[in-house]
Structure formats: structure tokens, C-alpha cells
Image (cartoon, rainbow, N blue to C red):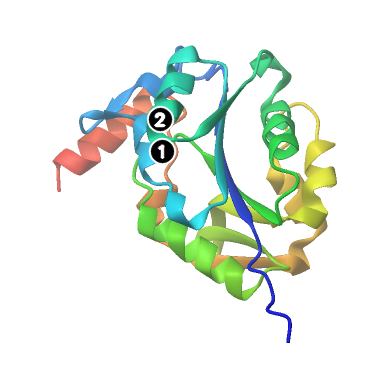
């Protein structure tokens, strides 16, 4: 009797954007003593992935990835939008069965929540599985291999949402805390988050 192989899952951490709304490299911004990119990498349960890849334009993030034991792909054209980051990372892991796509600006995302997304996908390996709160989807999100070509054909600032809208019947949601989905796009958003945490 042949033993079925466990599907191989990769993790793509998207950390290449110009952060025009933030005004500088927002991933170097500090929340509770750690940079946003460090918090993102610490939320990756690396034992659950065949490979973890960070796509970035920043040499310091490439060095940090190496410290975590992750591979890095240099994005020389962050101005081409999120689609180029997705294409680079997906091409680098297209031999895997699925990829978890993760943004780098959710400082409250917990490793346990990422694990929950992965575990749900393992039970539904043909599904697109995303983190959500009260039905509102956010990141991270897992796409099986059959969607890789579609993801790599995206252009400019079109991301995974475009693919999900075309295949909404394949989507499975994993409930996580609302604050974990909070992303930081502006200095004010970071200040508001700091104020909110300090008032608790």
C-alpha cells in the first residue's frame, strides 16, 4: 500500500514595497521594541514550511532573513507593484504544492494564528485558505499550486484579492483576532496602534 505524501507548503514573506504612504521604509519602524519586519519573521512557524522566502528590495532585510535561516530574493523593481513581488516569490517556490503569502506590516499577528491557517489548509488542500475576522478576510492567505500561474500573471498593484474574487467558491476562512489583521500603512496608523496599546 502506497503511503500518500504530505503536500509541501512554502511561505512567501512580501517585504519589498516602497511604502509611499509611510514616507520611508516602514518595515524598519519599531513597534514595542522590534521592527515590523522582525515581528513578521517571528510570526512564521518555520517548522510547518518546506521553504520560507522573503522578497525585498532592502539589503538589511536580506541579511535578517539569513539570520532566521530563510532565503531571500532581491526585488530590483519594487515600483512595479506587489504583483512583481508575488511573481518573484512564486517562481522561486513553484515546485511546491501551495504557498502561504504573508505581508510584513501586521505587527500583532501571532505565530499561533499562522499555524491555524496552515492546519486548516492541510484539512482542505484544494482550497484557498485565508485569515479573517467576522467574515472579513485579511492576510496571510494560502494558494494551492493550480493558482500559481494566475498569481504570476498579475500586474502592477493587483494582488491575491484579484484571484480570490475569481474563485470565491474555493475560499475557506480561519477566524483570528481583529487586531491581528491590522496593517500599518502610515506613521499615523502606527501611532494610533501604539496609543491604543498603551491605553489598555
Picture mark count? 2
Circle 2 crowding by C-alpha within 10 Å: few under 14, some 14–19, many from 20: many
Q: Could you tell whether 151 is left or right of 125 in the image?
A: right
Q: Quick one: 98 or 138, which is closer to the camera?
A: 98
Residue 22 at x, y percent in the picture: 46, 19
Name the residue: 69% across, 24% down. 81
Occupied quadrant, residue 71: top right
Q: Could you tell whether 189 is left or right of 129 in the image?
A: left
Circle 1 crowding by C-alpha within 10 Å: few under 14, some 14–19, many from 20: many
Residue 83 at x, y percent in the picture: 73, 31
Q: CA distance from mark 2 to mark 1?
A: 6 Å
Residue 130 visible in the snapshot: yes
Residue 126, placed above or below residue 13: below
Task: List the single residue furthest toward the left.
Answer: 199
Label ID, residue 41: 1
Name the residue: 56% across, 27% down. 72
Q: Could you tell whether 97 is left or right of 142 in the image?
A: right
Name the residue: 41% across, 59% down. 113
Residue 168, placed above or below residue 139: below
Query: Badges 2 and 1: C-beta atoms under 8 Å apart?
Result: yes
Name the residue: 45% across, 12% down. 24
Residue 87 at x, y percent in the picture: 74, 33
Residue 75 at x, y percent in the picture: 64, 19
Q: Quick one: 126 or 161, which is closer to the camera?
A: 126
**The N terminus lies in quadrant:** bottom right
Residue 45, placed above or below residue 2: above
Label ID, residue 37: 2
Residue 101 visible in the snapshot: no
Amino acid at each position: 500500500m502506497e503511503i500518500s505524501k504530505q503536500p509541501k507548503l512554502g511561505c512567501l514573506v512580501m517585504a519589498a514595497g516602497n511604502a509611499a504612504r509611510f514616507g520611508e521604509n516602514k518595515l524598519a519602524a519599531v513597534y514595542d521594541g522590534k521592527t515590523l519586519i522582525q515581528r513578521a519573521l517571528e510570526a512564521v512557524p518555520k517548522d510547518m514550511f518546506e521553504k520560507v522566502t522573503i522578497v525585498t528590495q532592502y539589503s538589511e532585510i536580506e541579511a535578517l532573513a539569513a539570520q532566521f535561516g530563510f532565503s531571500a530574493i532581491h526585488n530590483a523593481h519594487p515600483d512595479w507593484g506587489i504583483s512583481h513581488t508575488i511573481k518573484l516569490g512564486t517562481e522561486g517556490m513553484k515546485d511546491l504544492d501551495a504557498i502561504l503569502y504573508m505581508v510584513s506590516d501586521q505587527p500583532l499577528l501571532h505565530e499561533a494564528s499562522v499555524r491555524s491557517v496552515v492546519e486548516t489548509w492541510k484539512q482542505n488542500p484544494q482550497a484557498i485558505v485565508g485569515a479573517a475576522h467576522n467574515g472579513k478576510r485579511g492576510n496571510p492567505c494560502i494558494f494551492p499550486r493550480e493558482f500559481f500561474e494566475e498569481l504570476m500573471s498579475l500586474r502592477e498593484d493587483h494582488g491575491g484579492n484579484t484571484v480570490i474574487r475569481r474563485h470565491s467558491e474555493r475560499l475557506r476562512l480561519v477566524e483570528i483576532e481583529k487586531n491581528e489583521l491590522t496593517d500599518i500603512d502610515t506613521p499615523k496608523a502606527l501611532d494610533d496602534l501604539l496609543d491604543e496599546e498603551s491605553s489598555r
